[in-house]
Image: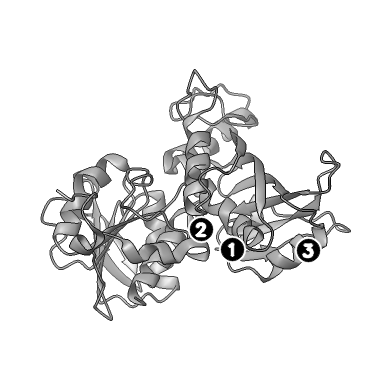
Amino acid sequence: MLNLQEPAEAQFRHVEAAAPVVAIVGATGAVGVELLRCLEERGFPLSSLRLLASPRSAGKTMTFKGQALTVEALDDDSFAGVDIALFSAGSGISRRYAAVAVQAGAVVVDNSSAFRMEPGVPLVVPEVNAASMAGHRGIIANPNCVAVIATVPLWPLQQRHRIRRVSAATYQAASGAGAAAMEELRLSTAAYLRGEDYTPTVLPHPYAFNLFSHNAEMDAESGYNGEELKVIAETRRIMDLPALPIGITCIRVPVLRAHAIALTVEFEEKVSPDDVRAILAEAPGLRLVDDRVANHFPMPSEASGQGDVLVGRIRTDLGDPTGRSVALFVAGDQLLKGAALNAVQIAELLLKR
């Protein structure tokens, strides 16, 4: 098994092939489908593609560049000859098979939470900390979707004005809980509009025309749920700010796709909204949507299906008389920049090294 505590030189994996062999683990899931689409739309220079999933999905076909590819059952022999393995099948599968893939010679880009806080595994948002990939030992972790979407605007601000504190409230779509939750939102909404009862089976509360605290496990002592604790820890790690104070409340909302976040950022010095707006307008991975006259700001409906993090509603926080705090609102596609797109961007960087 992979020993993450060994020196980086012992297990470093370069991707030497100009056109690597790529495998997608969890190809039939919501993120797996988006990984396939991102590879195609971005023209990723692969020589061949393997689609891997559970035995119950084996034999299904998926289309890539106009060709039908057959999904294969994942097993210990699946990674022979694979250069890059994109994992999106849950932490249990990642813990079982990531080391197998690395030992077969692949670099793993893992979408699960399995390795995100492992000291030997880079946790990467390419617009923020691509340089951290240099010491990888065969596994690179894709962060929590909220941490990805939040750090894309936070990082360029930190580069110009040191951040003192972050306060956040999230509005998280069904896509964050997978395809089954998205379908439950559709079915429960249709039942609600027909005046019929609907018993949820995927999420713990009625979803149609409702919102509730994120369904991650609650820590009874702190009062924070697992999603909130993950976002705090991962944001600090991505930005290499281990002591950054972060307060956050994560809420599941009845939106099919794309998460939104209200951010209030306190800086160590007074910063104007115009300065923040100018910084974010030039930052990679962001698109400014900040039309006060038309009351047009980031929305999940406009964030869905595209890769930019939308940012706007930039204004002074009137709750801070010092003028050091600025409020903003962001929205990003959880399945794309929050998952599949970020993973493919990491894979693209592997080819440049």
Residue 14 figure quarter: bottom left
Precedes in sequence: disc 2 or disc 1: 1
Question: Residue at image x 33%, y 46%?
Answer: 118
Residue 280 figure quarter: bottom right
* Mark-to-mark CA distance, 2 and 3: 25 Å
Q: Name the residue under label 2.
A: 337
Q: Name the residue under label 3.
A: 275
* Up-down relation of residue 235 to residue 85 (above or below): above
Q: Name the residue under label 1.
A: 308
Kind of residue indicated by mark 3: Asp
Looking at the image, which is closer to me, 204 or 70?
204
Q: How crowded is mark 2: few (under 14 residues within 10 Å), some or many (20 or more)?
A: many
Question: Residue at image x 34%, y 48%?
Answer: 119
Left or right side of 113 for 156: right
Element class at badge 2: helix
Q: Which x, y percent locates residue 178? A: 43, 42
Q: Which x, y percent locates residue 44? A: 37, 74
Residue 261 figure quarter: top right
Q: Do the residues labelled 2 and 1 touch (CB within 8 Å)?
A: yes
Q: Residues within 10 Å of mark 3 (few under 14, many from 20)?
A: few
Element class at badge 1: loop
Left or right side of 131 for 333: right
Element class at badge 3: helix
* Mark-to-mark CA distance, 2 and 1: 7 Å
Looking at the image, which is closer to me, 1 or 340?
1
* Mark-to-mark CA distance, 3 and 1: 21 Å
Kind of residue indicated by mark 2: Lys
